[in-house]
Image (tube, rainbow, N blue to C red):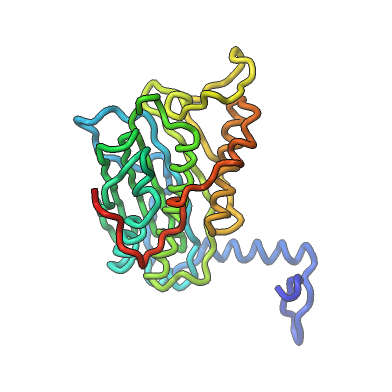
């Protein structure tokens, strides 16, 4: 692309492409991408983020009432196909990024212990951050990092127990949602740099799910009290929540924040709420919701 025009090569010179030529070029590149291979052809299982088992069994803890899952990632340059694995440097980079992530602490709502590696395989890694018995809600976080072809995908999960007032209030749920997105973006970026495959790279589409515990509805795990809702006889209270696949304008904190608020707006409108838009747009973003400085020391272990 030169000066806003797509050029293609014909014998002797380059010519501007018309609409049909652009579509042909895109289709050709898509076929090549779907069939590209490196020196090692690794088979991959289907990517099913809602079905991946990331949580340990709860035994003596209060019952979990809600869980949030967020996925995102990067499409890496073609050279990653010749090294289709997550090496030791990538594993350490993931731990460094996770332990500096904003999900570690959101005083006084929840606290998490440091992240630990639960499973390390050639093409996927599992991590867990255990709960601390402080804060309004007892919380855990989990992560699953996967390299499949050129796609470095990451699932971050966050689940919580019931607090004194019930589920998470809406603004704290926004903190968890944006915190998970920042954790995905910063970890994938740091891992790609450690593997020397950060550039050129493109962000993958984002998607999220809210999964209430057994027998609960969305309104039971995230408090929407105080919001205007239409005639309660016709209001739909869904058993799960879905934040549809979407692309952020960029990978900076402002771009992720905008998408998180757009997701919440879509979700609340889908539950027949009204008059909340200014409230969501007016929330201040807390200082802990920022891209982590990986050069800084880790937060104090609690």
Q: Position of residue 56 (x, y in %)?
A: 25, 39
Residue lying farthest bottom? Answer: 12
Q: In this rendering, would 205 be left or right of 151?
A: right
Q: Which residue corresponds to the image point at 76% horizontal and 84% vertical from the top-left?
A: 13
Note whether residue 39 is visible: no
Question: In the displayed structure, would residue 107 be above or below residue 38?
Answer: above
Q: Could you tell me how many numbered marks the image carries?
A: 0
Q: Nearer the viewer, residue 40 or 53?
A: 53
Q: Position of residue 269 (x, y in %)?
A: 62, 31
Q: Quadrant of residue 216?
A: top left
Residue lying farthest top? Answer: 233
Q: Which residue corresponds to the image point at 66% horizontal and 63% vertical from the top-left?
A: 26
Q: Position of residue 42 (x, y in %)?
A: 37, 62
Q: Nearer the viewer, residue 267 or 14?
A: 267
Assign the N terminus to one quadrant of the image: bottom right
Question: In the displayed structure, would residue 150 be above or below residue 232?
Answer: below
Note whether residue 223 is visible: yes
Q: Position of residue 39 (x, y in %)?
A: 39, 72
Q: In this rendering, would 99 be left or right of 7?
A: left
Q: Nearer the viewer, residue 110 or 196?
A: 110
Q: Which residue corresponds to the image point at 35% horizontal and 34% vertical from the top-left?
A: 160
Q: Quadrant of residue 80?
A: bottom left
Q: Which residue corresponds to the image point at 36% horizontal and 67% vertical from the top-left?
A: 295
């Amino acid at each position: 692309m030169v000066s806003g025009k797509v050029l293609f090569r014909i014998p002797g010179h380059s010519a501007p492409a018309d609409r049909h030529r652009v579509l042909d070029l895109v289709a050709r590149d898509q076929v090549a991408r779907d069939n590209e291979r490196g020196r090692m052809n690794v088979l991959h299982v289907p990517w099913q983020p809602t079905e991946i088992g990331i949580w340990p069994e709860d035994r003596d803890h209060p019952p979990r009432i809600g869980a949030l899952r967020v996925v995102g990632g990067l499409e890496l340059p073609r050279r990653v196909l010749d090294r289709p694995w997550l090496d030791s440097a990538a594993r350490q980079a993931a731990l460094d990024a996770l332990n500096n992530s904003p999900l570690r602490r959101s005083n006084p709502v929840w606290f998490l212990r440091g992240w630990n590696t639960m499973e390390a395989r050639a093409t996927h890694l599992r991590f867990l951050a255990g709960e601390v018995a402080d804060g309004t809600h007892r919380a855990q976080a989990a992560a699953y990092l996967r390299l499949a072809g050129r796609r470095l995908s990451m699932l971050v999960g966050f689940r919580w127990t019931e607090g004194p007032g019930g589920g998470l209030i809406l603004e704290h749920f926004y903190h968890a949602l944006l915190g998970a997105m920042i954790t995905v973006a910063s970890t994938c970026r740091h891992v790609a740099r450690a593997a020397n495959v950060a550039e050129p790279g493109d962000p993958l589409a984002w998607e999220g799910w809210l999964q209430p515990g057994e027998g609960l509805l969305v309104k039971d795990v995230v408090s929407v009290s105080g919001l205007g809702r239409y005639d309660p006889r016709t209001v739909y209270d869904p058993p799960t929540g879905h934040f549809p696949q979407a692309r952020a304008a960029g990978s900076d904190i402002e771009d992720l924040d905008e998408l998180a608020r757009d997701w919440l707006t879509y979700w609340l409108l889908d539950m027949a709420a009204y008059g909340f838009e200014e409230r969501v747009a007016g929330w201040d973003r807390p200082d802990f919701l920022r891209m982590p400085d990986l050069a800084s020391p880790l937060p104090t272990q609690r």
